[in-house]
Amino acid sequence: MSAFLPAFAWQSFAVLGRHWRVHLRKWHTALLPPLMEPLIMLLAFGVGLGSHMSTLAWNGQSLDYLTYLAPGILAYTAFMTSFFQSLFSAYVRMHFQKSWEGQLTTQVRLEHVVWGEALWAASMATAYAGMVCLVLAGFGISGSLQLHWFGLLLSLPLLFLAALAFSSIGLLFTATLPSMDHMGLPFFLVIMPVGFASSTYFPLPSLPVLDQVAMLNPLNHLAEGLRDLLIMGHLSWHLAAAAGLSVLMLAVLIPIDLRLLRKRVFGDSR
Amino acid sequence: MEAVDSIQEPLLVAHGLVKSFGEKRVVDGVDLTCAPGEVLGLLGPNGAGKTTALRMCYGFLRPDAGSVRIAGHDLTAAPDAARRALGVCTQDDTFDADFSVRGNLEQTGRYYRPRLPQLSQRIDELLEQFGLKEYEHHMPEMLSGGYRRRLMIARAVLHRPRVVFLDEPTTGLDPQARVAVWELVASLRAQGMAVVLTTHYMDEAERLSDRLLVLQGGKVRASGQSVHVLGDIVGEHIVVLPVNAPGAEGVPAWLTSRGLTASTVLGFWHVPLDARGLASFASDFPVLRYEVRIPTLDDLFMALAEEKKQ
């Protein structure tokens, strides 16, 4: 339990506040990618590619590709943003900027730095997902997308929880990657397989092995749960599965992250 | 909250510190104390365990055994209170590259509770004291090495700690910048802070430290004022003579017969001797020409290196 209490400590929020403060100073450049990326993806794939496709069959429904894609992009944004922040950005702060070490000479301890990074990754992921919601709303206003819009608001807390869980995987790599040159590894080992087996961008082909992998994939449940919520307008077991798997990931991975990062930062795992 | 207010009581009390990495015991039962207004110089050759000991004292490493109290607060049992009372200037620059000089101090202030009273005023005071006022809006990477060190030390004392740890604070600085840092260290001592300093510059240790603690192989080899430490480990006099000096052929045998060792530096023997040994040397080598000087901390390091070899 001691690995989780620091999540609520003022020191973790002081670290989180530091990241927000830096980010807000760069808001004018930082705002563009989270707005433009979903816009381009929805236009290119949802509208562009979708216009060359017939409808998709999903849960007995017949959907156009844009409608299928919209909840998937929301889930994928939370996953990617959180993973990127907790891996690449945290690694730079830890290894190159040495800002972790500076924080650790104060009342902030390693568990606070780690939780600060995880909370920051989850906050950023939720904020970016919020921007995706704005883009989706734009499509809705233009009449090209019909969703149960209240579901967007309901989805944000779950996206935060899932993003927090994804950050624990990112931090695992931050703790173990030997150098910046190995940064490609987590993309091949985690992002691509998890993204592939997730039904974010396309319905999964029905293969027994893939079905089993998808059952354990929180991103798959998140995407499917958001589809149920935003397209069908109801809460489904997928949302509960996504939340449960997220809590499980946090329970297992955060203590491991802390131990490995202690070893990495201090040369000692005690 | 328990706190130490008596100036008699050391602000730093570390007792029985032990730390092993794998099979290797790096620090083995080290005790150290530092009183208000005192500078303790922590010395030792590379691998002696001084950085590990220091890191346990400021909470980076957890000791396998032993305890650390900062201003009366146990570092393990009351980490927040203990850390509030200590300041650290690490060997590497670890300021936040995303903030200006002033921004670094402001951000550091946010890492302390209770919140620092009148933070802005305190920052102005430090910027003036450390000569950083004209650079307050510069990014740290724009500063010269000397000013970066000043910023690091300013950050370490922002919250008015009782104990300050300075890990090689002048490494890589030019002589003028070193003197500026020395003056800052002296001012910290004058403010009543307990200062623990590690350095590889022996002149720096001698000038700044009230007391030295010499580590060797993870244990305390000697402690006290520099003159006593040198006397204990090195001797009272150093005889310096060329290895190939005429008449010096008998010196190695003379040393061996007395259980003494000389360090050899650039073709010169440096022979540590007490007063009786010096008299005996003068009597046994009457025609030899040599120099006699008082020992320095460089000799201490040479002596420790010789000990390690043996």
Image: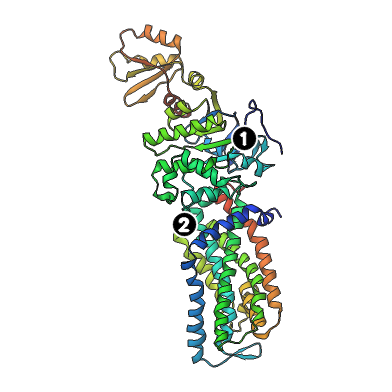
Q: Is residue B187 above or below residue A137?
A: above
Query: Are there few (<14), some (14-19), or many (20+) residues within 10 Å of tag 1?
Result: many
Instruction: Tell me if residue A223 comes above or below residue B90 in the rendering.
Output: below
Task: Give the label on residue B243, or none.
Answer: none
Secondary structure found at label 1: strand
**Nearest to the observer: residue B134 or residue B204:** B134
x then y, percent, for residue B104: 50, 49
Q: What chain does badge 1 belong to?
A: B
Q: Amino acid at mark 1?
A: Leu
Q: Are marks 1 and 2 on the same chain?
A: no
The answer to whether the residue labelled 1 contacts the one labelled 2, judged by CB atoms less than 8 Å apart, is: no
Q: In which quarter of the view is residue A216 placed? A: bottom right
Percent x, y for residue B45? 47, 32
When asked about the image quadrant of residue B279, the answer is top left
What is the x, y in percent for residue A199?
59, 80
**Quadrant of the drawing holding the N terminus of chain B:** top right
Q: Seen in the image, is A205 located left or right of residue A32?
A: right
The single residue placed furthest to the left in the displayed view is B246
At label 2, which amino acid type do we have?
A: Ser
User: Tag 2, which secondary structure?
Assistant: loop
Query: From this viewpoint, is residue A177 visible?
Result: no
- Chain of the residue displaying label 2: A
* Pointer 2 residue: A179
Which residue is found at the position 57% from the left and 50% from the top? Answer: A263
The Cα–Cα distance between marks 1 and 2, rounded to whole angstroms, is: 33 Å
Determine crowd level at label 2: few under 14, some 14-19, many 20+ residues with C-alpha closer than 10 A: few
Whether residue B5 is visible, yes or no, is yes
Tell which of A144 and A78 is nearer to you.
Answer: A144
Residue at label 1? B17
Whether residue B171 sits left or right of residue A108 in the image: it is left
> What's the residue at 41%, 11% (across, down)?
B278
Instruction: Tell me where residue A251 appears, x and y as whole percent.
Output: 68, 61
